[in-house]
Image (cartoon, rainbow, N blue to C red):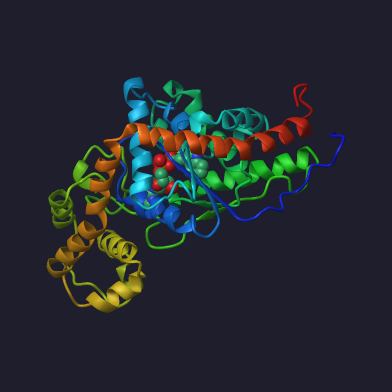
């Protein structure tokens, strides 16, 4: 045990989230995560990073990794994150994440990780050929969050299970090392119609970077024509839109497009139905396409403008990493003391 009782977390609400630099960002990433980052930064301390340590869990071309990190950073900036307000950085520039992850590897139980559905999805039939990193990835995610003692994590629905694991790890650490309340139990912020955006080709699977069909998603870098065409070609059914949200049940594609419209317009799905009930997709899709182009179109343009000056992006990431380390280092130092490390 420690000489001094560690102080429970009593700081302000603190937001943290991250995105992996693998492939193009899409509408699901935007509505499930990025749009919330920009909003939350004005409410409280906000830490947003690019998860380049996580990217290594699957093969990524070393020549591309750094430019992918810059691209995600450009997306953060183009969707409204302000580096003077939020702390924006690359995970690999803050070694405290990986150091805390080791301690958490010894706190988390194998049985907990065995239940992670994302590992099962990503590993598929080739579990034994997957990297060990892919398996323990949610433990690193817990360290990402708790090394800042973050209290709120804006993410899409698919990250909910990882957040539950983070809470389990925080709770077990606090209990086993007799450090009550040292780590807060962070909450996932998944509210709103954008939390689970589905593929435009199949309403039963989520929109994803790894879907081989580019028509299944709207990329942040798509131009206006591509966006409009993908919306026009999105799979739908032949019925008109109903009056009540409950009546969208069993119509996954219709439910998804109404949800996308609602999230882009900052409305609820019911408000969208109040406007479009009784109309078919022939009328609804052009309206959705116009809305998507007006919201998403400028983001791609701004990303291209920002990416033309990589040195400025690197400067922002460098300054963000310094600020992030100033918060993470004392937390890690406390952890080392709490667990009794010689170097603690
Ligand atoms: P990643 O890179 O897969 O996705 C980034 C964010 O986008 C959300 N998202 C979606 N939201 C709605 N509909 C969809 N179809 C959709 N697809 C993706 C994800 O939920 C996520 O919020 N493990 C994380 C990265 C990470 C992280 C963290 C997040 C690493 N450490 C700590 C939060 C806190 C991931 O792979 O996200």
In the picture, measured across the screen, residue 188 lies left or right of residue 231, that is right
Task: Report the residue at 19% width, 46% height from top.
Answer: 215
Tell me where residue 220 appears, x and y as whole percent: 27, 46
Drawn side of residue 7 relative to residue 120, left or right: right
Q: Where is residue 48 in the image (x, y as percent from the top left)?
A: 48, 44
What residue is rendered at 65% in x and 41% in y? 169
**Residue 174 in the image: x percent, y percent?**
74, 43
Q: Quadrant of the N terminus?
A: top right
Q: Where on the picture, by quarter, is residue 114?
A: top right
Q: Which of 221 and 210 is in front in this view?
A: 221
- Is there any visible trace of residue 217 in the rendered image? no
Q: Which residue is drawn at 60% across and 31% down?
A: 96
Number of numbered discs overlaid on the protein picture? 0
Q: In this view, does 221 lie to the left or right of 119?
A: left
Q: Quadrant of ligand 1?
A: top left
- Report the quarter where the C terminus lies: top right
Residue at left 35%, top 51%?
Answer: 79
- Which corner quadrant of the image does residue 3 belong to? top right
Relative to the observer, which residue lies in front, 48 or 109? 48
Q: Is residue 25 something one can see in this rendering?
A: yes
Residue 125 in percent (x, y) is at 38, 29
Figure quadrant of residue 21? top left
């Amino acid at each position: 045990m420690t000489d001094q009782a560690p102080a429970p977390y009593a700081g302000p609400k603190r937001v943290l989230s991250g995105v992996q630099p693998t492939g193009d960002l899409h509408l699901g990433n935007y509505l499930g995560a990025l749009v919330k980052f920009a909003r939350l930064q004005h409410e409280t301390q906000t830490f947003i990073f690019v998860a380049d340590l996580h990217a290594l869990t699957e093969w990524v071309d070393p020549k591309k990794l750094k430019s992918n990190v810059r691209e995600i950073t450009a997306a953060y900036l183009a969707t409204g994150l302000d580096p003077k307000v939020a702390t924006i950085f690359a995970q690999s520039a803050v070694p405290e994440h990986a150091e805390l992850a080791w301690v958490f590897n010894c706190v988390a139980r194998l049985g907990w990780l065995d239940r992670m559905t994302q590992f099962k999805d990503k590993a598929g039939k080739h579990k034994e050929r997957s990297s060990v990193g892919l398996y323990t990835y949610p433990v690193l995610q817990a360290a990402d969050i708790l090394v800042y003692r973050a209290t709120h994590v804006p993410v899409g629905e698919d990250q909910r299970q990882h957040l539950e694991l983070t809470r389990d790890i925080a709770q077990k650490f606090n209990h086993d090392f007799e450090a009550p309340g040292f780590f807060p139990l962070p909450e996932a912020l998944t509210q709103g119609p954008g939390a689970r955006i589905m593929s435009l080709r199949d309403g039963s699977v989520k929109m994803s970077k790894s879907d081989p069909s580019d028509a299944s998603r709207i990329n942040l870098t798509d131009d206006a024509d591509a966006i409009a065409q993908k919306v026009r070609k999105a799979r739908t059914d032949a019925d008109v839109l109903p009056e009540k949200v409950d009546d969208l049940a069993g119509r996954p594609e219709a439910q998804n497009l109404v949800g996308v419209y609602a999230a882009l317009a900052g409305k609820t799905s019911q408000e969208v139905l109040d406007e479009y009930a009784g109309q078919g997709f022939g009328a609804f899709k052009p309206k959705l396409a116009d809305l998507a182009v007006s919201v998403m179109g400028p983001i791609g343009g701004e990303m291209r403008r920002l990416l033309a000056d990589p040195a400025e992006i690197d400067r922002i990431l460098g300054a963000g990493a310094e600020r992030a380390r100033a918060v993470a280092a004392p937390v890690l130092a406390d952890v080392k003391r709490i667990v009794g490390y010689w170097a603690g």
